Amino acid sequence: MDERTIQKLIEEAVKVLPNSYAPYSGIHVAAALITDKGNIYRGVNVENSSYGLTICAERSAVSAMVTAGERRPLAVAVVTDLEHPIPPCGACRQVIAEFNEEAEIIMYSVKSGERIIVNLRDLLPSPFKLRR
Ligand code: THU
């Protein structure tokens, strides 16, 4: 992914970070993904009193993409207000892999400015698959 797109995805995630609903953990996360059509979809974590119902930012963004009729994320930025960037949790890795096993994952901390970029293949080498 080119530097301009990486910066754009981080910016788009940072814009919605204040909308993160995280009254229980206090950990705010936002995600922005770009598809093969060049469109950007965003999501934030949405926590719940029944903790296990919490939805991560990455899965919110994938849902927004699918709702809009798209199927192919090329890169996903995950932005947090923690000191260090965080990788997608196992569930989110699997959900992103459903649509692109080799998506670029861009992790960024607004607190420290630290940035890490990895390929989903390295985070989840062997996703569960039913299709094909
Ligand atoms: N969280 C995400 O939004 N994405 C991840 O990949 C890891 C965790 C959220 C869920 C919860 O609201 C908070 O971070 C603490 O686990």
Image: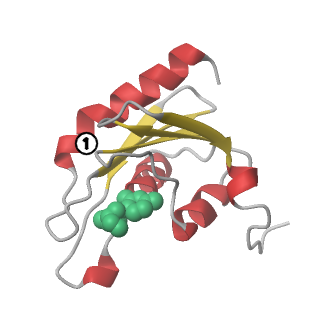
Q: Quadrant of residue 55?
A: bottom left
Colour scheme in use: secondary structure
Q: Residue furthest top?
A: 4
- State the SS at label 1: helix
Q: Vertically, is 101 above or below 33?
A: below
Q: Which quadrant does the C terminus fall into?
A: bottom right
Q: Which quadrant does the N terminus fall into?
A: top right
Q: Vertically, is 32 above or below 25?
A: above
Q: Nearer the viewer, residue 27 or 52?
A: 27
Residue at x 46% of width, y 21% of height: 7
Q: Residue 95, position in %: x, y? A: 58, 63
Residue at x 53% of width, y 63% of height: 92
Residue at x 13% of width, y 65% of height: 23
Specify the amino acid type for callout 1: Leu
Residue at x 79% of width, y 67% of height: 126
Question: Within the displayed image, which quadrant is ligand 1 positioned in?
Answer: bottom left
Q: Is residue 11 visible?
A: yes
71 sits to left or right of 41: right
| Count of marks placed on residues | 1
Q: Is residue 74 visible?
A: no
Task: Classify mark 1: residues with Cα within 10 Å, few (<14), some (14-19) or many (20+).
Answer: many
Q: Vertically, is 74 above or below 21?
A: above
Q: Nearer the viewer, residue 86 or 66?
A: 86
**Circle 1 residue:** 17
Q: Residue 38, position in %: x, y? A: 55, 25
Q: Residue furthest left?
A: 23
62 sits to left or right of 120: left
Q: Residue 39, position in %: x, y? A: 49, 29
